[in-house]
Amino acid sequence: MNAGTAGEMRLVFLGPPGAGKGTQAKVLEERFGARQISTGDILRANVANGTPLGLKAQSFMDSGGLVPDDVMIGMIESELAKYDSFILDGFPRTVAQAQALDALLAKLKLPLTAVIQFDADRETLIARLTGRWTNPRTGRTYNSLFNPPLVAGIDDDDGGPLVQREDDTRDVVTARLATFDEKTAPLIAYYANSGLLVHVNALKSIDDVTSDILAALQTRPKASRA
């Protein structure tokens, strides 16, 4: 894979919260042009723009329910059709969603290149997630472990206070990781059976994780559009 080209890089990033999936997706998007596709962003955009699928999703959200898989797949289909290369970050989350995604990608003739599993131990993930602090005015984030502000609790740029989001407290983080184990971890077996799964050590440096992903992709056969 040559630097500066995506080589039709079509990936699913799989792993628990705090494993660095979003960071690596941004790196690969910037370096190779593979579009980072976040289902959260797609959902928010459809709702904000009042699309038919967005209105349907809003009705479930207003009643406190989860957005059904068929609605999310519909949103993802219109997004995937725009790109030859993409990184799915945050979807699928269940085996049922993975099966629906397989059917969609077969329809679009966009087979996956690989599924990257980000491996990290539980205590490190908890430390990473509970160490996150955010500037509520700009959205800029820090981490007390590996990207601390110059002065604790103060944003480097605007000098205002940093806050810890409610979902970054230890109790909430522990619950999120338990949900991942219950709902999403079975995807590891699903994609291992398909031969698409690649494991990377998410505890390495950002550059080393990127290098490991690219090295793994170098050894994989090219996906066919047939």
Image (cartoon, grey):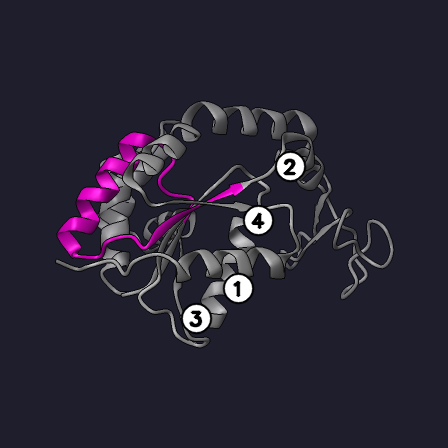
Of label 4 and label 2, which has the lower sequence position? 4
Residue 214 picture location, percent across and down:
47, 61
Q: Which residue is mark 4?
A: 20
Residue 90 in magenta?
A: yes
The residue carrying pointer 4 sits among few (fewer than 14), some (14 to 19) or many (20 or more) residues within 10 Å by Cα, namely: many
Q: Indicate the amino acid at tag 1.
A: Val
Give the extent of the magenta segment: 89-118
C-alpha span from label 2 to label 1:
20 Å
Of label 2 and label 1, which has the lower sequence position? 1
- Residue at image position (60%, 38%) is 120
Q: Indicate the amino acid at tag 2.
A: Leu
Q: Which residue is mark 1?
A: 27
C-alpha span from label 1 to label 4:
11 Å
Of label 3 and label 4, which has the lower sequence position? 4
Query: The N terminus is located in which quarter?
Result: bottom left
Camera-side residue of 44 and 106: 106
Q: Which residue is mark 3?
A: 32
The residue carrying pointer 1 sits among few (fewer than 14), some (14 to 19) or many (20 or more) residues within 10 Å by Cα, namely: some
Q: Secondary structure at mark 2?
A: helix
Q: Which residue is mark 2?
A: 125
Disc sitting over residue 141 in the figure: none
Of label 3 and label 2, which has the lower sequence position? 3
Q: Secondary structure at mark 4?
A: loop
